[in-house]
Image: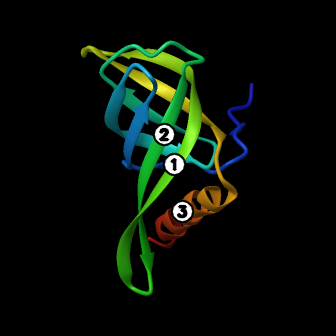
Amino acid sequence: MSSKERRRSPRIENNIPLKISSEDFDIVTESKNLSCSGAYCTVSQYLEPMTKLKVQLLLPLRRNNKLSTKKVSCSGVVVRTEPYPQQNNFNVAIYFNDVQDRDKKVIAEYISTLLEHQTSS
């Protein structure tokens, strides 16, 4: 059995401020990992798989030696919810099902910048 990566988009392990919401709740958390197609994070309440979400990411971007924060908004859906050991939290996998092309480019730029930095260190 192969442990080959099945994801199409590169994924980075990084903590990005993240707000997820629906009609019933707003949760502020941070990502454990991120790709152009989704995020993985810890939340304090159980989220039913297939729950539709509004997602906001705050990505720190460096351009011309200046650091700025870019807010990316998209829609997502919960694809997996797992109990977090020893705490009353849950790990949640979110698939981004509606992302504007310009926002997808911002996420991709952020990820590729971090991947370049990791390979050069």
Disc 3: which residue: 115
Instruction: For label 3, count other residues whose C-alpha is less than 10 Å away and answer few (under 14), some (14-19) or many (20+).
Output: some
Left/right of residue 109 with respect to residue 45 in the rendered view: right
Q: Residue furthest bottom?
A: 64
Between residues 28 and 22, which one lies in front from this camera angle? 22
Between residues 40 and 72, which one lies in front from this camera angle? 72
Q: Amino acid at mark 2?
A: Val
Q: For residue 82, which quarter of the picture?
A: top left
Which quadrant: the C terminus? bottom left
| Disc 2 + disc 1, Cβ < 8 Å | yes
The image shows residue 56 at horizontal and vertical percentages of 45, 45
Left/right of residue 87 with respect to residue 70 in the rendered view: left
The image shows residue 36 at horizontal and vertical percentages of 62, 49
The image shows residue 2 at horizontal and vertical percentages of 73, 31
State the CA–CA distance, disc 3 to disc 2: 23 Å
Residue drawn at 52 percent across, 63 percent down: 110
Of the numbered discs 3 and 2, the one sitting upstream in the chain is 2
State the CA–CA distance, disc 2 to disc 1: 6 Å
Q: Amino acid at mark 3?
A: Leu
Disc 2: which residue: 55
Q: Residue furthest left?
A: 87
Residue drawn at 35 percent across, 29 percent down: 26
